[in-house]
Amino acid sequence: MKPLRIGLIGYGFMGRTHSNAYRKVNNFFQLEHQCVLQAVCARDAAKVKAFAENWGYQSIETDWRKLIAREDIDAIDICTPNNSHAEIAIAAAKAGKMILCEKPLSMNGPEGRKMVAAVEKAKVPNIVWYNYRRVPAVTLAKQLIDEGRLGRIFHYRAKFLQDWTISPELPQGGAGLWRLDAKAAGSGVTGDLLAHCIDTAIWLNGGFEKVNAMTETFIKERKHTLTGKVEKVGIDDACAFLARFQNGSLATFESTRYARGHKALYTFEINGENASIFWDLHDLHRLQYFDYRDQSIVRGWRNIHVSDGDQPYMKHWWVPGLQIGYEHSFVHQVADFLKGLETGQPAGPTFREALETQFVCDAVLKSAKSQKWEKVAKAR
Ligand code: SOE
């Protein structure tokens, strides 16, 4: 097997999900490459050492530039806050490293475009961690749509609801809370949560044409963890938008961190002329499917438990009927990325594909300001 020596930058929540995926993937998938946890990098030497020991990384760095310069690293995994993705990715591409970048790709479309140019110029394999595509039930939804079972699609409806930022006492900025700081995150729920919904939607239903959005920042000021001062909040706490897809379908998207009672309720429903699909992250192994072509006396919503060997990814895991969870979507992403290296057919979303999501986010935020329909710029 060929070693694929990983250099991970950042050790937060995503650093853990990715590390877990690298450790497991070769136990469950037959691949040419073997992931090697070569080095992990973060600024705090004591913390990064503890992380390396826990996850089995062979070495540490405290300066990402040194990590990128190392000859014994093949792939850079970027798990840092959004405002550092571009600088790191562009430097990693110049150094000829493969790049696996945490979502969203960038702070905005123009910055993302520079990242796309850098990886395409350097011809380095690249991918963005939009992991929900690889929940087996979501991948099955893609299969059913591509087989034409839904027919013409009329509606796409997605939500991503959370409730963890309702307290005005919650500070912004710093480890764990950089998502509340616009300077580090770029935007609020639009780039953090709706970006997932948009990526899945583009994958399942094709490109967006235009959007009409509203956003709100419910808590206008929060103490900043790094400065200790009360500062203006620049992120969107909630965002809802209407969209028209290029295929003529109509859509609604909603995300908030103020939906009391919901921790991570990502749902989508798609209505086609023959059939409909519904998926819910809280019940992630199930796909709800309604097919109007069923005989009328038995017609109804089917609740498909996606756990059989002939359903996406499942033959790699346990026996039929036994389900898997959130962390497996990351294992699948690494498996597909490695398969892409073998076959020369890159797994998506590549930086260029993820740029489309960035342009939708830009149009959404622009529309929330202009109060008008805004066209989505083309990434290709
Ligand atoms: C935010 O709470 C968050 O962790 C996102 O950053 C992730 O991308 C999402 O999958 C779950 O929620």
Image (cartoon, rainbow, N blue to C red):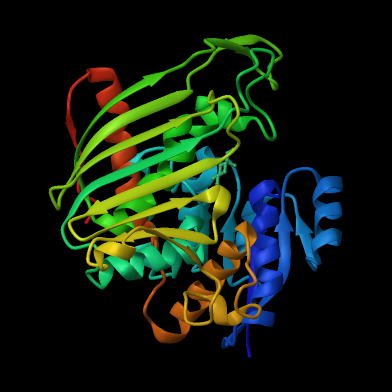
Q: How many numbered marks appear?
A: 0
193 shown above or below 149: above
Q: Using residue 121 as the reference point, say whether residue 233 is left or right of it.
A: right
Which residue is drawn at the image coordinates 35% and 58% (left, top)? 300
Q: Using residue 367 as the reference point, say whether residue 102 is left or right of it.
A: right
Q: Using residue 43 as the reference point, say whether residue 131 is left or right of it.
A: left
> Residue 252: x, y in percent?
29, 36
> Residue 284: x, y in percent?
54, 56
Q: Quadrant of residue 176?
A: top right
Q: Of residues 297 and 1, which is closer to you in this image?
A: 297
Residue 91 in sight: no
- Image quadrant containing the N terminus: bottom right
> Residue 222: x, y in percent?
61, 13
Q: Quadrant of residue 30?
A: bottom right
Which residue is drawn at the image coordinates 57% and 26% (left, top)? 180
- In this view, the residue farthest toward the front is 297
Which residue is drawn at the image coordinates 32% and 59% (left, top)? 203
Which residue is drawn at the image coordinates 24% and 62% (left, top)? 150
Q: Quadrant of residue 187?
A: top left
280 shown above or below 368: below
